[in-house]
Amino acid sequence: MSETAPDFDLPAFERYLDRVFGANPSGSIELQRIGGGQSNPTYIFAHGGRRMVLRKQPNGDILRGAHAVDREFRVLSALYGTDVPVPEPIRFEADPSVLGTPFYLMAFIEGRVFSDCRLPDLSPDERRALYVSMAETLARLHRIRPDDVGLETYGKPGSYFARQVHRWTTQLHASVSAPDPVLHELAGWLGDNLPDDDGLVSVAHGDFRLGNMLVHPTEPRVIAVLDWELSTLGHPLADLAFCCMPWHTSPDEYGGILGAVSEGIPSEAEFVAAYRRLLAEVPEPEPFHLAFALFRFAVIFVGIADRAAAGTAADPEAARYAPLAHRFACRAREVLDGNAHAL
């Protein structure tokens, strides 16, 4: 948690809260920024004894369709009250004159966030239980029919991987960084080896990983899924394969578990089996799906590196992610080659 000054007019925000929720008996609010800073700025605050979270678009120019806080609020509103744990959505504000950008408010939930997939601070039994909880939470999300919760227009059903490979390949080609031959070769392979469309469609989180799970304060179970910025209608195997990346990346590659010894953590096959116990209609991920997950994250790292080079990255240490683009591309090639040796 950070005490970084907010990127908006705090008195204007306080006046907005008083207008919407009534006067704050304690006067001014205290704001704490949370998160790593790559995505939408996020703050915790209390107003009238109620703790809430503010999530807003970053200031300045943004890519079309990026940082869509309106979509985040929509999917939270659709899922709240289902068996998919999400924070209670409170209010969306589209008027940028209030804080300079659109934003939304959601309820604060007390919990823990883990970024190291080895979970060194947990016991072996807790590690296994938390991984199983994460797999079951993802399966519960994918079990929901979009039209049952008003999300039938949340994205384009069908041809998901074709559209995604095209999207991320286009973004890769638009990068100003020095081209990575391995990454560009991988993009070409994915485009040439698209799987047949099997008709499976689900609400896809788009960034379903341990770091975006809120864990119970004392128990090894997921109590809220956070950061829905990349959510859409998609293929369930995209999320499932993305969640399997830690088994194919090392601890210094964004907190993976490849080559690490962490007793209790299930194998990748056991994790997938825990998911499929609740949703057997989704097949096991194939090498294409895992390679695509690693490719997509590699291109995200390229984008972060581009912003760091241009001096526009929200994270002052964003440049440290640049080498990960090449390493994730190599990991994808290892998956396709069936060779999980270290770099």
Image: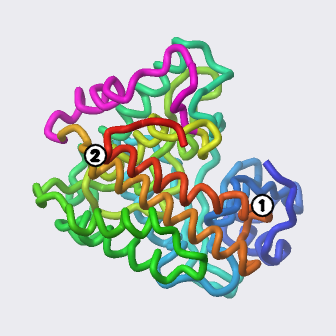
Residue closer to the observer: 28 or 302: 302
Q: Position of residue 48 (x, y in %)?
A: 76, 53
Amino acid type indicated by mark 2: Pro
Residue closer to the observer: 36 or 55: 36
Residue under label 2, please give it: 287
Residue closer to the observer: 26 or 83: 83
Residue under label 1, please give it: 317
Residue closer to the observer: 1 or 211: 211
> Residue drawn at (85%, 74%), measured in percent from left and top?
11
Q: Position of residue 340 (x, y in %)?
A: 42, 36
Q: Is residue 206 left or right of residue 121?
A: left
Amino acid type indicated by mark 1: Glu
Q: Is residue 133 magenta?
A: no
Q: Are the residues flagged by discs 2 and 1 in contact, CB closer than 8 Å? A: no
> Residue drawn at (71%, 49%), measured in percent from left and top?
50
Q: Is residue 301 above or below residue 58?
A: above
> In this rendering, does residue 83 appear at all?
no
Q: CA distance from mark 2 to mark 1?
A: 32 Å
Per the rendered image, the range of residues in magenta is: 256-282
Query: What is the secondary structure assignment of the residue under circle 2?
Result: helix
Q: Position of residue 12 (x, y in %)?
A: 80, 78
Query: What is the secondary structure assignment of the residue under circle 1?
Result: loop
